[in-house]
Amino acid sequence: MDKWVNFPLFAITSIVLWVIGFAFISVELFNNQKTGLRRAGIVLSILGSIVFASFIVLLWISLERPPMRTLGETRLWSTFFLATAGLIVYLRWRSFLFVLVYGYALLLAFVFLIINLVHPEIHEKALMPALQSPWFVPHVVVYMLAYALLGLSCGVGMFGLVALTIKKYDEKILVLGDNMVYLGFAMLTFGLLFGALWAKEAWGHYWTWDPKETWAFLTWLAYLIYLHFRYYHPNKTKTHLWILSISFIVLLICWFGINYLPSAQNSVHVYSN
Amino acid sequence: MSTEQSPRKALWDYPWGYTESFIIAAELLIFGFIIEFLTGGQGLAPISMPYNFYILAIFAGVLIVMRVFYSQNPVIKWLSGVPAAISSIVAFGLITLLMGFIPQIETPSSRFIDLIGLTHLKNGWPILLIQVFLLTSLGMVCLKRATSLKLKNIGFLLNHFGLWLTLVAALMGSGDLKRLSINLLEDGKSNNIAISRSNEAYKLPFELKLLDFHIDEYIPRLVLVNPKTGAFIQEKGEKVITIEQGKTYTLKNWEVTVEKFAPDVVPQDSGSFLEKEIPGSYPAAFVRIKNKIDGKTTEGWLGTGSFAYNPTYLFLQDDVIIALTMPQPKKYRSQVIVSENNVVKDTVTIEVNKPFTINGWKVYQLSYDENKGKWSTLSVLEVVSDPWIKIVYIGIFLMLGGSVFLFWTGRQRIN
């Protein structure tokens, strides 16, 4: 049975839980005291993630393969990771700023979710032999985690630029961005290197400058530049915020954009129908 | 350390900062494109053993000498600093960006874009010069940090030296990398002649004989097709139907019951189908179809067809036919006898993602006669020899360790 037909039900349930959960949590924006409402919000948010995760698990079972082959399937993972990572980041620091980060994470999660609702793909069970490997799941999972974290860091960058313009900038903003980039970059490196090790087993060589590899490498370089520039010139705040915001565009081209590039028409990484 | 330039410093006064670094990186790039053009725009032929090894030894030696004896020289200081690092990363990024937008080709012709190397950047002069710049800067930094092995420096070295090793081994190793393909037929004969991408024959130090090539296929899908365009009539997000005996499916206005599904049939002259597994046989299904609007029923065979026979389908309407898709391969594998000097060594099964290793060569399942599908008697294997792979792996594992470090410690507070 194809479980995708149930997607709207699960998706809308999750959205409702996340939105109400977030609304309860953001009461904090107006009221600094701990309230029962906020606790309820956290519980609802967790429930939202659980409902969404159940859908992924059911889809996995019904397809009899990991739901990671098509772009639509990877969007499911990023929706889940974004919503969940946003909540975890909020629970870790619990301050005003992090309520906004959580809100931004949810917004980004909803964009990916709505694309899947409006443009559902044809999901089939067939998984081409090249993807049948123990590397498949870790490779995609670390990448989707990296994308979620770096997506958050882009939001932090843009938020910081706005804060700078209205003269409300606080050094905490970039420290938050740094934490996300360090985690995200570690994940990005894992994804890239797992991919190289897998490519050696599947295609005979660890690096062939396939368009997806080229763009993945560019993404990696962009964040590499951020890390170095940030570390050695800690006071060039505006440049840091711009690098954070722009690097995510490179990442998005790597993830979706290359499907539209003439240079990528022969990529071995395009698995959609 | 401070690399900020004071406003009074003239260009090229020491210490060099970002301006000088980016000028040097840009000059290297432009210089690279010029040499590429002057040397005919065919890219660089990679250097193989033992010369690549000598070059690496000299390069590493020069780095060490520079570090040990000339560490106070302002140019060496600059090479070990952040502006050189960032400008070389940016220049490498720029070449990669060009590669990301300009379609890259294997055999350049004589268009201007080919002559300056823009269509084969991965083995051209610009990337080589920038890589040497990057590797010098990265190497100097590693040597600088290697002198004190504090915990913080270990994480640093895992990442930086790992990257240096990986890049160096990939660059130097490209001259010794052999990626060849070999065609094996189920004809009982051994073969040891592999062919390179530029169609040169290469004699392998072992022989391969194909015992059996086998494909497992996915069950075909039941689809509606527009006979004029050949396109599937399918809504986005609609579920995919893999055919199953005894099931009833609804496609648009039709209810389709699968009375029988047979994985292998051969059509008979009488128009009936015989269940038999012989070369050219294919999956077929006997279906009964009811039009939900007018209640009319039809029945008949649907077959995927194969290289030997045409597919069978049914017209539901002038512009709608119902058919089975050609089955997709699920797994394909070759059972191969490996021998050396005509002495049988082993019988192995080679599958996609499951290569076989012999004497430093890796043998991969690459392809088959796609026209014949599961009846292909041809198996195409890829044979790869990459003597530098171990160094690449060491580099990769160092970087993985470095990433764990990065993940664990996160950002060290500065200031």
Image (tube, helix red, strand yellow):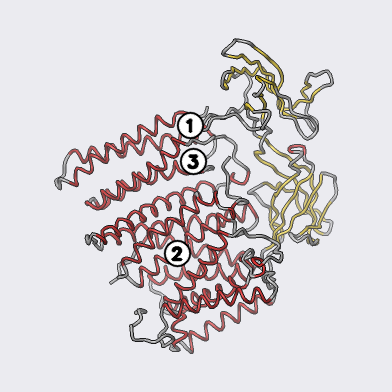
Q: Nearer the viewer, residue B254 or A260?
A: A260
Q: Chain of mark 3?
A: A
Judged from this view, the residue extending furthest toward the top is B295
Q: Which numbered circle lies on residue A4? A: 1
Residue A230 lies, in percent from the top left, at 36, 68
User: What amino acid type is highlighted by mark number 1?
Assistant: Trp
| Chain of the residue on which disc 2 is drawn | B
In the rendered view, tell whether residue A78 sits above or below residue B86: above
Q: CA distance from mark 1 to mark 2?
A: 40 Å
The label nearer to you, 3 versus 2, is 3
Name the quadrant of the C terminus of chain B.
Answer: bottom left
**Mark 1 surroundings: few (<14), some (14-19) or many (≥20) residues within 10 A:** many
Q: Please name the amino acid that badge 3 sits on.
A: Gly
Mark pair 3, 2: CA separation: 32 Å
- Name the residue beneath numbered marker 3: A72
Chain for disc number 1: A
Tell me the residue that label 2 is attached to. Answer: B402
In the shown orientation, is residue A111 left or right of residue B299? left
Query: Would residue B119 be found to the left or right of residue A3 on screen?
Result: right
The picture quadrant where one finds residue B393 is bottom right
Describe residue B124's horizontal placement relative to residue A219 as left or right.
right
Query: Quick one: SS at disc 3?
Result: helix
Packing grade of label 3 (10 A; few <14, some 14-19, many >=20) is many
Task: Report x, y in % for residue B174.
Answer: 65, 67
